[in-house]
Image (cartoon, grey):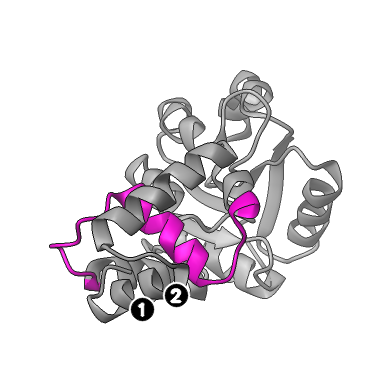
Amino acid sequence: MQEFNINICLIEDDETIREGYEYLINNTEGYKVTGSFPSYEDAAKKIARCEPDVILLDVELPGVSGIDAIPKLKKLVPEAHVIILTVYEQELQIFRALGNGAAGYMTKDTPHERILTSIKEVMSGGGPMSSQIARMVIQSFQRNEESPLTPRETEILEQISTGKSRKRIAEELFIDLETVKSHIKNIYSKLNVHSKADAIKLAKDNKFI
């Protein structure tokens, strides 16, 4: 018989998703949701009393974003491990989250069993990541350090290489379409190319992406 529970707090603004995770966790032996909140601001008022071992945290929240909330949560509940659980896979966000103190970074399409496993992993000192996130982190360390591109330009060119439109990139990176176009113009100029295909090929050949 299970003698203890891992206390988990959820911070997720989508009520359906939040309730889904709450149901999954509370119906799994050894896990217990002690707090469920739609925003950091709501969580800040009560989370210390919830005594969480692990916090599952969304990135896109009303008010304070999930990434900006991490250091604030670490002050409120220093012993808690924070796992980002999001639909976003942008490299800059991943490294900001990890730099701010996140112990793991999972995407919401991760199988439920893997999310439960990731909770156990952080309790044992691990740093769980979805496979595609881990791949991005590894690739970032394999890149050519002599790349002329800025981190944001690199991120945008990577998004372009996956077939995403400029409009989609702007939406996912929370920047204006004109800003994306400006970055692409700078990328072409720095790489001395005149087309998307040439930019991608040159960047991949030189391990800029």
The residue tagged 2 is: 197
Q: Which numbered tag is attached to residue 20?
A: none
Tell me the residue at 54%/71% (across/down). Answer: 162
Tell me the residue at 57%/25% (across/down). Answer: 64
Q: Amino acid at mark 2?
A: Ala
Check disc 2: other Cα within 10 Å, few if <14, some if 14-19, many if 20+: few
Q: Quadrant of residue 125?
A: bottom left
The residue tagged 1 is: 201
* Disc 2 and disc 1 in contact, CB within 8 angstroms: yes
Q: Amino acid at mark 1?
A: Lys
Q: Between residue 154 and residue 55, name the one nearer to us.
A: 154
Identify whether 119 is placed above or below 17: below
Q: Secondary structure at mark 1?
A: helix
Magenta-colored span:
142-168
Magenta stretch contains residue 127 = no
Q: CA distance from mark 2 to mark 1?
A: 6 Å
Q: Is residue 58 visible?
A: no
Tell me the residue at 45%/26% (across/down). Answer: 72
Q: Between residue 185 and residue 10, name the one nearer to us.
A: 185
Q: Position of residue 121 (x, y in %)?
A: 46, 66
